[in-house]
Amino acid sequence: MEGQNVRYACERLILRVVFLGLAVVFVTVLIPQIWNLFSPFLLALAVAAMLHPLIAFAQKKLHMKRGLAVGLCVAFVVTAAFLLLYWFASFAVVQLISAAENAPNILGSIIGILKTASDNLLDMASSLPQDVGQAIRDSLNSAFASLSSAGMSFARDSVNYAVSFASSVPYAFIYANFLILAMIFITNRYDKLLGFLNRKTDTSGEESLRMLRQSAGKGMMGYIRVQLLFSLLTFLISWVFFQAVGFDYAFLIGVVAALLELIPQFGCGTLYLPWSAICFIVGTNRNGWLVLGLYIVYSMLRRITEPSLLGTNLGVSPLASLIGMFVGMRMAGVIGLILGPIVMVILISAARSHLFNSLLGDVRVLTSYMQQRWKRGQGKAGDARGC
């Protein structure tokens, strides 16, 4: 009996150590990775939970359709966030400009204070013994050297921070795009998410593998259809736009933009962004703004419609397609942005066809066994203490 109690105590101690190690790994490794890959969707889920009562009120009391209520609520949140960010940025810019304009006065005041303090200390050192005076002079020299080094380091860090901030601005716009779309999709389907995740189908064995192969093929063909559709859309929009504003060779421009749009690593931005930059450099600002404006409008149109089109053609919801695009982009860049929705289709199809059931079953059996051992050990330990 005593040997069993010792064995059970050792098992519980080992389990506690394992759980502690898993908790440390989860907090230090998994949580940052989860946030890195899913942060816009976690934020959108929190926003959807906060907006749910307001949307329900608009539907029941104001008799709004859910799509209209969701659109208004999300637009309100995005507008409020933009105004808050704009106010903060404006405030920071005003303060920085004011500090830059008064920098000579501020620097002069600081130098004057330091010079006065240094002169007072030197006067004091002249009336003290030679060793003490020399120690004060050495301390002043060391302090000024440290202050100079700190100033240089601060200037270098400021420049590096400014460069890093400037390089992160394009990603911030991409992130904001994913966040807004995630808020729309999650808020619109907030009541149906649990039902969608819990949906099951009755398939097994060869039928599951057949479904998985069909889903992978459907995902690839659906992705190709979407890319061809956007290429055709690029051609039509470019042709009509440049023809309307009086550009020569509008048809040829549309063809080139459409062909570039078929290349995922390039896209029509490979043509329009350098073109607009060259127009600004040579002084034809009107053409530069027209080309840049066309690219911005088309990019916004694509970012808004691409998740829905991919979801429809790939056989998954727009939200799942959006998650696949963002996670793929974070993990593998442009290639991940392309393959992410297809991988999401395969994973969802595998889950629906119960290919993960055996793994989940093994985990449940092991968990049940460990719970029984834990309870049995606690019972034995309690009996031993009672004796």
Image (cartoon, rainbow, N blue to C red):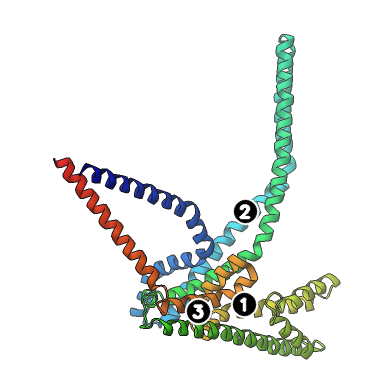
Amino acid under disc 3: Pro
**First of labels 2, 3 by sequence position:** 2
Q: CA distance from mark 2 to mark 3?
A: 38 Å
Residue under the point 75% across and 13% down: 126
Q: Secondary structure at mark 2?
A: helix
Image coords of residue 62 (percent x, y): 36, 80
> Dot 2 corresponds to which residue?
92
Disc number lying in front (1 or 3): 3
Residue under the point 71% across and 32% down: 146
Residue under the point 74% across and 87% down: 254
**In-front residue for pair 282/150:** 150
Image coords of residue 290 (percent x, y): 74, 79
Q: Is 122 situated above or below 324?
A: above
Disc number lying in front (1 or 2): 1
Q: Tell whether 131 sits left or right of 62.
A: right
Q: Tell whether 39 sits left or right of 54.
A: right
Q: Residue furthest top?
A: 129
Q: Is 260 situated above or below 143?
A: below
How crowded pointer 2 is (Cα within 10 Å; few <14, some 14-19, many 20+) is rated as: few
**First of labels 1, 3 by sequence position:** 1
